[in-house]
Image (tube, helix red, strand yellow):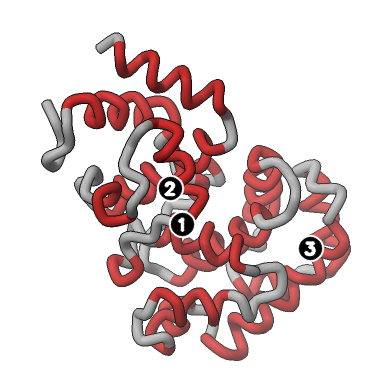
Amino acid sequence: MAKNGAGEEDAAVLDVLLDRYGRTYAAEAGIKLADQPKPLYQLLVLATLLSARISAEVAVAAAKELFAAGYGTPKGMREASWQDRVDALGRGHYRRYDERTATMLGDGAALAMDRWKGDLRRLRDEAGGDERRIADLLMEFPGIGPTGADIFLREVQAVWPQVAPHLDRRVLDGAAKLGLPRQAGPLAELAHSGAELARLSAALVRVSRSKKSADAVRSAAAGR
């Protein structure tokens, strides 16, 4: 059955896409995303790690190591020594950028605590819930540029309806590879909720990086 007014072909593609690739990066990193300070900060850390020229798998593994070591809050991250952060990143094989990233994470944790009391909901409120202003404030964190802000916003739209739909160029490129709408409005209408929109965004990012994956999704959808 078609979803949200989508044609049967789009609905079939969507079903296969979400089934195969529809896991957010936050979920992969073990973040139970909610509109609460701790998971929001953890998402910021993950976005920082994903921003580097390193595989998503390594970034997720490094995030898990940081959180397991007790650095999943701004206080924990700031109080950890620089070497402790380097070591945790190394255990996640995040080695090319470990020293620089350890510094950025420490400085970012201090900024989060000093300016927003460790609560990124305060950042959102300072921006008046405006997506572009939120992005601008996120980019004040060391290691977060336009790419990192997009990563954070793609995932946080599951719990921050103010920023939904956030469908950046990489997401729309993935949609084009599957023959789905390449306009944000029509593409967003395929999702039932902010949570599904975040899953759809993550899936389309993965497909945007792999023609083989895109072809496999289209082939499986055509066979339904």
Helix, strand or loop under label 2: helix
Which x, y percent locates residue 201?
41, 47
Q: Which kind of residue does numbered mark 1 sit on?
A: Asp
Q: From what the image shows, is residue 90 above or below residue 121?
A: above
Query: Rounded to the nearest whole Å, what is the CA distance between mark 3 and mark 2?
Result: 29 Å
Foreground residue among 97 and 207: 207
Which x, y percent locates residue 7?
17, 31
Few, some or many residues within 10 Å of mark 1 (<14, 14–19, 20+): some
Residue drawn 63% across the image and 81% down it: 140
First of labels 1, 3 by sequence position: 3
Q: Taking 81 as reference, is 77 left or right?
A: left
Residue 47: image quadrant is bottom right
Residue drawn 64% across the image and 69% down it: 145
Query: Rounded to the nearest whole Å, what is the CA distance between mark 1 and mark 2?
Result: 6 Å
Q: Is residue 70 visible?
A: yes
Nearer the camera: disc 3 or disc 2: 2
Residue designated by label 1: 168
Which x, y percent locates residue 101?
79, 63
Nearer the camera: disc 1 or disc 3: 1
Foreground residue among 187 and 63: 187
Q: Is residue 27 visible?
A: no
Residue designated by label 3: 101
Residue drawn 54% across the image and 81% down it: 137
